[in-house]
Image: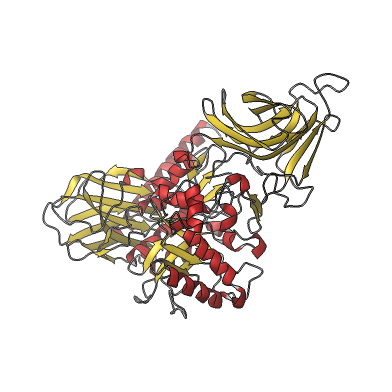
Amino acid sequence: MGSHSAVLLEVFIALCLVVFQSSAVKVDADLNTTLTVDASDSSGSPIPDTLLGIFFEEINHAGAGGLWAELVSNRGFEAGGPNTPSNIDPWAIIGNVSYINVETDRTSLFDRNKIALRLEVLCDTTGDNICPTGGVGVYNPGFWGMNIEQGKKYKVVFYVRSTGSINLVVSFTGSNGLGNLASAEITGSASDVSNWTKVETILEAKATDHNARLQLTTTTKGVIWFDQVSAMPQDTYKGHGFRSDLFGMLANMKPRFIRFPGGCFVEGEWLRNAFRWKESVGPWEERPGHFGDVWMYWTDDGLGYFEFLQLAEDLGAAPIWVFNNGISHQDQVDTTAVLPFVQEALDGIEFARGDASSKWGSLRASMGHPEPFDLKYVAVGNEDCNKKNYRGNYLKFYSAIRSAYPDIQIISNCDASSQPLNHPADLYDYHLYTNAKDMFSRATAFDRTSRTGPKAFVSEYAVTGSDAGTGSLKAALAEAGFLIGLERNSDVVHMISYAPLFVNTNDRRWNPDAIVFNSYQFYGTPSYWVQLFFSESSGATLLKASLQSTLSNSLVASAITWKNPVDGNNYIRIKVVNFNLNAVNLHISFNGLDPNTVQLSGSTKTVLTSSSLTDENSFSQPKKVVPIQSLLQSVGREVNVVVPPYSFTSFDFLKQSTNLEIIRSDSSSRASI
């Protein structure tokens, strides 16, 4: 194209921009909306302390290969079940059949996981069959590569026995077996290892590799057995086994509760593969692990019932335990035969709450937590309301738990948002997965719900399908509108949590998810950032707010007051979702405030938006769609602001400390946004 043509094109584009901007200004001028907020001392109503929390399910390798920092996958060689030969994946052999023969047998030291790995080493340091340089043995790549970082320490533990003396090298190497990141030599006489012996060593990395592997190698002829091989970073949160960076993402959400461990993971496709809490406690070496046949992968259950309770305590969140009620996706026990499941639930509550001298409380104490956990909520099953035996089974659980623990809040699977339950419950479960348009329209879902009876627990919600991608702005904005509706109905909505929480990018079983990670990277999707807008709502005060607008189908708003414990200041927070392609001129009017109550200094605006509704975050652009905070330019009892198109905006108005005090607020600073 010639220069003359280029000039004409530039003029044409400039004219188009002028016409577009003039048109946009005219449209915006027509989109005037007023939000009237009653900020008087007597107008507010308390929001439950428990409003916003998190739901953790073992899906997408959220725990195994995720939050739980264990680096070794299939550490007990049990993934193939109790039969031999067993499936040892992802373990693989170093060497060929002329040097080594590897198989599984049932000679383990542990009764509940009998499979061990047997290595017959055929080569030696001398003779006709000399071992190759570096030796022969086995390696484990972890969960799509182990993240080994220079200067950090890793505790490696394994059990070994042999027919003769051993000379082993335990090492972290690159994914191809090259490059010694860290290593230790383990030796022992025949008498030392004639019986199963526990070996522990600390490896300090001298280089970084995000895709490393763990190797066990030797150049000594003989027969060696290995079992329960573990490698844990030494920098987990408080030494409790949680990956510190992912734990930090949870802590930033300031969750008031955590629902665990599922979800469908609790049910199982078949009952034989359902999560069983008793199989997930005690020493990690003795846990049998199980195959989660809903999400189709093996878990060693290192992240077990005890660890979930510990996670809740570390987060300062109330634990909500979901247990199996004798029903899976494909089979269920009759109510006449459900009592063993009821007893298992009662035993589980005793494990969490019982005195250290009780049967199950003593097991908890032996694991390092003599004091009881603060378990006050349990859910009887997951998404089982329409199953034939659910109501009968539920009533058995309800009666037994209410009798033994009258203070525990019991959650039913059945939705009571539009019609009463036909059984007693303290809360009921409400799940919603839908498209963006429908999700946004559900902002009024609880407007007409009965104000008597059990409270709602919206324990799973998310925009899914083509609107969501792997975590789009469009999905997040629709969810924000829905959350504002839930906040406005917090007299009947007691708890809210998004699902799923985590996804390892190497095993996406579900899209989208709040937090995305691999062995060393992580980021929050726009849906994650939306939840942070509500982190101060728990325990705050809901203000009466009236929106006068012609955009009732695309604009929602709410108002709260909250106290920041960091600076001790009180704030009025206005949250507005504009699910429209045009900006909106919003006039905010405060009633019930004395003159000069709202302060300019310290009042802020935080906006979540982007150039396209399909925009997502990624490892290369982890903050492409994140909230941006700025200072407000003018404040008072009357405020005029512009709400951008397709955006979620939060206005925090700083109040004089002598005015409205927030009831029961212990929420934290908004600095995480």
Does residue 607 lie above or below 52 as drawn?
A: above
Does residue 312 lie above or below 567 as drawn?
A: below
x, y percent for residue 519: 57, 38
Q: Nearer the viewer, residue 311 or 31?
A: 311
In the image, taking residue 635 as reference, residue 504 lies left or right, namely right
Residue furthest left in the image: 595
Q: Quadrant of the N terminus?
A: top right
Q: Residue at x 46, y 64 (%)?
A: 378
x, y percent for residue 256: 38, 55
Does residue 215 lie above or below 298 as drawn?
A: above
In the image, taking residue 633 as reference, residue 103 lies left or right, namely right
Q: In terms of image quadrants, where is residue 268?
A: bottom right
Q: Nearer the viewer, residue 150 or 442?
A: 150
x, y percent for residue 515: 50, 47
Q: Does residue 625 show up? A: no
Q: Residue at x 36, y 60 (%)?
A: 51
Q: Residue at x 37, y 65 (%)?
A: 494
Does residue 106 lie above or below 556 as drawn?
A: above
